[in-house]
Amino acid sequence: MSTLSPRLSLRLTQKLALTPGLVQMVTMLQYNRLELKNMISQELAENPVLEESQESDEATQEEIQALLEAERMADPADANLLEMIGREVDEPEHEVSAVPVDVPAEPVEAEAPKEAADTFDEIDFGSFFDEYLDPGFRSPSGEVTERASFDTFLSAPVTLSQHLEQQLALIVLTPAQREAAETIIGNLDENGYLMVSIEEIASEANCTLEVATEALRFVHSLDPSGVGARDPRESLLLQLEARAGRGGVAWQIIGRHIALIQTKQFREIGRLLSRPQEHIDIALRVIRQLDPYPGLRYSGVPPQNVEPDVHIFKEGDDYIVQMNDDDIPPLRLNPSYRKMLDRSQTTDQEIKDARGYIRERYNSALQLLKNIEQRKQTILKVCQTLVARQPEMLDKGIDFLKPMMIKDVAEEIGVHPSTVSRAVAGKYADTPQGVFDLRLFFSEAVQGSAGAETPLLVVKRKVKRMIEEEDTGHPLTDEQITALLNDEGIVVTRRTVAKYREDLNIPSTHQRRVRA
């Protein structure tokens, strides 16, 4: 019987490893325009070889194009990435990935004649780096002052807790009341509702129930009105009370018959309150102006400005795809550092170390420029394919969108689907029909004779349009909507229509019906 015993074994294996350059390229591909601009600004601050140029550096562009041609990367296909990864599997981790640039390698055995002067030694590195690192060394007239970004002057959004605490600081309260009020504010959710009972507030604030109740009354008086309520009904009542509407028709509707509002039984409300329909209609208009979730205006995500990454416009009969490079600083390699790498061999260890650092920074900067160009070419190829596949959508609108999958575009341009997914993630295109998320162009087709040419997004829009045009007294049921879609050649089930309706936040037939 054999026994198990520990032993050492040597095995040679080969596996893929991502180099820093490839990681940067994959990461950069999924950056949108603003993220790319921030990354470039950070690289400009960290790499002295990289600098911003007011005009295109032809020498640098030629080097980048030479790199792309040498690596056969006219389009950044994933197969080429795997080749690059395979070449560097066995390289030591401390080595920098070699790139075929015109940077002369230091000879190992060849030495310069002793009588020849080393021009590299003639460079005063101390003064050169002092001038670079110390801005006070330069004449102020020769410097370009960088203006502060407009974002610097924008204040951070005020949270609900901060907004309430600022108001609470202006109210005269006893220490116990103030502590209880701050405890209440700390227990509000994003909607502005109180998540715990008043007994728990009194226990947490170490005060009496009367003090906690009085503190809650002070919180109810703060702006926005309705905060500190336990549910939407109480929040609406607090808002009416703040508008001197206590006891009115709107107050009675919310207090007694709020469920009838959800089912739109407006005449039934008038009958129960013994009020004419005119009074009910006025009260309903008042109620519609109230906010059942008063805290969301401070707790919600603030709207963000969208800057398109790509411009798609029409010239004649053809669509043109153009990258939006506004405000993205053009980059070039510092020519002074490039000349330092062309100097002859030296035996001075400090100078050799300095040259090695410059060569490392130079290769890193060149790799960055190459990755930026590859990102640009990938996005352009994806968008050109979108334009070729969706001409009717660009001409007539989103209702003419055709079904298209990410894998179809990936096969056409010769890349992996994950590359296309990264290329369109978080990016927007400015088209003749408006600004759209690039992911909007990708939508699967539904079943049926006409469904094969109808994407899921268009079907949802059809369902929404049917409901908007329905008779509110006799709204369409999910079965009727299903039948209408089947008549158009789009085969869906009632359960699928119900799912579409829920995705669109459309209430059920019973809730949409308005009773006469």
Image (cartoon, rainbow, N blue to C red):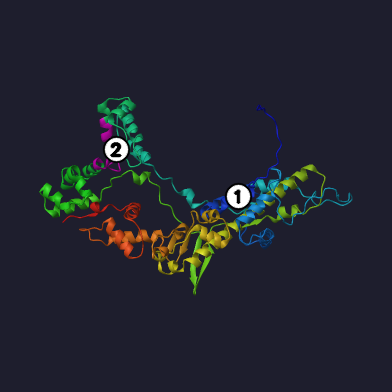
- Out of 149 and 501, give the one closest to the viewer: 501
> Label 2, on which residue?
228
- For the N terminus, the image quarter is top right
> Label 1, on which residue?
24
161 left or right of 129?
left
Task: Please state which of the two labelled residues, at mark 1 or mark 2, is closer to the viewer.
Answer: 1
Element at badge 1?
A: helix
Find out whether residue 19 is within the magenta segment: no
- Out of 158 and 428, give the one closest to the viewer: 428
Tell me, for residue 85, which label it has, or none.
Answer: none
Q: Amino acid at mark 1?
A: Gln
Circle 2 residues within 10 Å: few <14, some 14–19, many ≥20: many
- Location of residue 217 by image quarter: top left
Q: State which tag comes first along the sequence, 1 or 2.
A: 1
Q: Amino acid at mark 2?
A: Gly
* One can see residue 356 in this view: yes
Circle 1 residues within 10 Å: few <14, some 14–19, many ≥20: some
